[in-house]
Amino acid sequence: MADLFRATLGMSSIAKRAFDLIVAALGLLVLSPLLAIIAALVSMTSAGGPFFRQTRIGRHRRPFKILKFRTMTVRPDAADGSFDAGDRCRVTRVGRILRRTKIDELPQLWNVLTGDMSLVGPRPEVPEWTKVYPEQWEIVLSVRPGITDPASIAFRDEESVLASAPDPTKCYRNEILPRKLAVAAEYAVDHTLLGDISIILRTGLAVLRPARSKSSAREWTG
């Protein structure tokens, strides 16, 4: 029975990786004109290159550089994993649109192609936050991080909540992160390819729907 379980798990991992490779490659190919236009807009409207790279912690605690379209003004320490949650003063005009539509995440298709990420999986964190709640992180980091996951949908207005919090860092550590980790751990121990496809579709719908109000967003922060 144990051998059958391992074989099934192995096949599931192979199918998930194959799905990631096919969708990421096709996505980069089809979206390349759009990506080029966005890169040009980012570069022309604010100082700095079109992309933002930052150290994140991946599967089995292996660090990697996550790739995004740059949505904020350049700050030297940002690439090292600074915590800017809730800070909107550095967001550029183009950046506001990219963040609201989640288009800034599209370059992560490259991270998927290289194997650092999956289309669906727990969102990767900066090193600082993977040092708290270590037991939960051991479960979460047993799988590849992803561009989207159930927590990304449930906490899609996280930035608004942190912006209105008296202490964004405390709010994230004590209220948001534990709940996100609980959702991420549940995904890590029980995920399927069909489930991943469902999460991708739900993510698309969540992006198209208007954001919840701040009052309703506070419901999941207690």
Image (cartoon, rainbow, N blue to C red):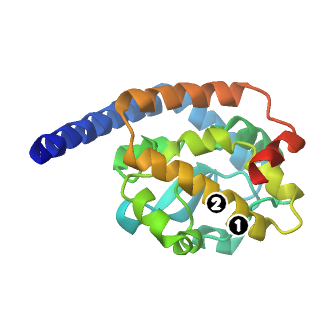
Q: Position of residue 137 (x, y in %)?
A: 47, 64
Q: Amino acid at mark 1?
A: Asn
Q: Residue at x 20, y 43 (%)?
A: 10
Q: Is residue 197 left or right of 132 when viewed as pictured?
A: left
Q: Residue at x 72, y 69 (%)?
A: 75
Residue 140 or 36: which is nearer the viewer? Answer: 140
Q: Residue 165 sits in which quadrant? A: bottom right
Q: Is residue 206 left or right of 18 when viewed as pictured?
A: right
Q: Residue at x 47, y 53 (%)?
A: 185
| Label 2 CA crowd tier, 10 Å (few <14, some 14–19, many 20+) | some
Q: Is residue 83 left or right of 57 when viewed as pictured?
A: right
Q: Residue 37 sits in which quadrant? A: top right
| Placement of 57 over or under 32, stated as above or below | below
Does residue 96 show up?
yes
Mark sitting on residue 100? none
Question: CB under 8 Å between callouts 1 and 2?
Answer: yes
Label 1 element class:
helix
Task: Pick out the residue farthest to the front.
Answer: 1
| Placement of 136 over or under 127, stated as above or below | above
| Placement of 124 over or under 10, stated as above or below | below
Residue 29 or 6: which is nearer the viewer? Answer: 6
Q: Position of residue 108 (x, y in %)?
A: 50, 46
Instruction: Give me the C-alpha separation between circle 1 and circle 2.
Output: 7 Å
Does residue 91 show up?
no
Circle 1 sits on which residue? 174
Label 2 element class:
helix
